[in-house]
Image: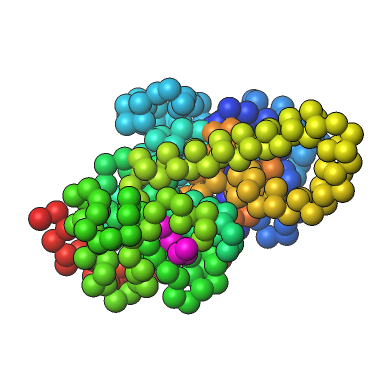
Amino acid sequence: MKIAIDAMGGDFAPLEIVLGALEAVRETEHIDVVLVGDKTQIFKILEDNNETNNPRISVYHASQVIGMDEHPGQALRKKKDASVVVATSLVRSKDCEAVIAPGSTGAAVAAALFGLGRIKGIDRPVIATPMPTVNGITVMLDSGANSNSKPKHLVQGALMGAEYAKLLLGKKNPTVGLLNIGEEATKGNEVVLATYPILENMKTINFKGNVEGRDIPKGTVDVVVCDGFVGNVILKFAEGLVTGLTQLIKDSIMNGGILAKIGALLIKPALKPMAKKVDHTENGGAPLLGVNGVFMIAHGSSKAKEIKTAITIAADLVERKIIEHIRETMEIEGAVKYEYDE
C-alpha cells in the first residue's frame, strides 16, 4: 500500500513530516510512503537519516507550496504544482491509495474536492474528528470543512459519521445526536430545526435526538453532527482546555510543597493512560469524508509522531474500505430524494 504525503505542509515541514514517514515505514511491513514536495530538501533529510536507498520511501517533486495564510481557492488556481495538489493527484491516478495533508485545512479540502471529486449523493465533504470521552470515543463532524451548512449537509454528515463510527468503534448500530442548545426538538436555529425531523425519519441511522455540548465529553452518543464552524470551535476549545488544565495541575504540584510532589509521583502511573487518551497528538488528524479517496487532514502543528499515526490510520481506512461503505450507504438511503433546501 502506498500513502502519499504533502511533505511541505504544516509548521514543521518538511523535517517532521519526513521523520514521521520514516517511523511509519520502520514500524509497519505493508505501507510504502511517497513524499511529495521539494526533492532537494526531502533528500537532504533522508540522507541525514541514512534512508536514501530505502525502497519503501520515494520522493515525488512538487515545486510549490500553499501557505497557511493563502486563500485556498485562489492558491489552487495559481499553484498547480503545489505539494498538496500533486499528492492528491497521485490518489486520483491510483498510484497511491491515500493522502496525508498537514498544513492549511482550507487548501486540503479544496485540493480533495477538485482532485478527487465527491461521492455521489454528497454535496460537501466533512471532517470527522474522534473526540475522547468517558465512554471511549465520540465522532464529531463536521469539525472544520464547512462553516455554513444547510440541513442536507448535516444529514449527509450523519450518514457518513455513522458509517465511520461502525468501522472506528466496531459498533453495528452507532447512536447519532444532533448538536443543539437543548434537548427539545423545538430548540435551535433554522438549520437545526429543519434537520431534526429529517434525521428522525431516516431508517439507516440510529438517531437519538438533540445533544448539548456537555454531552460530547460524556459520550452520550457515538456520533455528534454539527456544522463546521461550531465543530471547529468545540475542537479548538477542547484542545486548549486540556492544555490549560494540564498546566494548572503542574503549577499546583510545583507550588504545593513536598507532599504535593510526593503525591504526584505516586499517582503519575495511574494518570498516564488518561493523559494519552486526551492527547490530541495521539489521533494523527481526521479523515475528510465524502470525497472519492481516503484523505487524512493532519494538524498544522503535526510532528513526526502525529504523521506516523495519520499514515497508519489512513492505511487502516483503505483496508476497511471506508469509501466503498459510504457509497453503499448513500445508495441505500437515497439521500438526494429529500428536498433539504426547501
Q: Viewed as shown, does residue 196 lie left or right of 260?
A: left
Q: Residue at the location (45% across, 64% down)?
A: 221
Q: Residue at the location (82% across, 49% down)?
A: 267
* On screen, residue 70 above or below 285: above
State the residue in front, 286 or 56: 286
**Which residue is most to the left?**
342
Q: Which residues are magenta?
A: 220-224
Q: Residue at the location (55% across, 46% down)?
A: 285
State the residue in front, 83 or 213: 213
Residue 203 in the magenta stretch? The answer is no
Q: Position of residue 304 (x, y in %)?
A: 68, 39
Q: Position of residue 83 (x, y in %)?
A: 50, 33
Q: Position of residue 219 (x, y in %)?
A: 51, 61
Q: Viewed as shown, does residue 19 lie left or right of 132?
A: right
Q: Residue at the location (65% across, 26% down)?
A: 41
* On screen, residue 167 above or below 232: below
Q: Quadrant of residue 134?
A: bottom right
Q: How is the image coloured?
A: rainbow
* On screen, residue 314 above or below 326: above
State the residue in front, 191 or 2: 191
Q: Viewed as shown, does residue 260 lie left or right of 111?
A: right
Q: Quadrant of residue 70?
A: top left
Quadrant of the image containing the C terminus: bottom left
Question: Which is the main secondary structure of the residues drawn in magenta?
Answer: loop
**Which residue is most to the top?**
69
The image shows a total of numbered marks equal to: 0
Quadrant of the image containing the N terminus: bottom right
Q: Quadrant of residue 8?
A: top right
- Can see residue 18? no
- Can see residue 224? yes
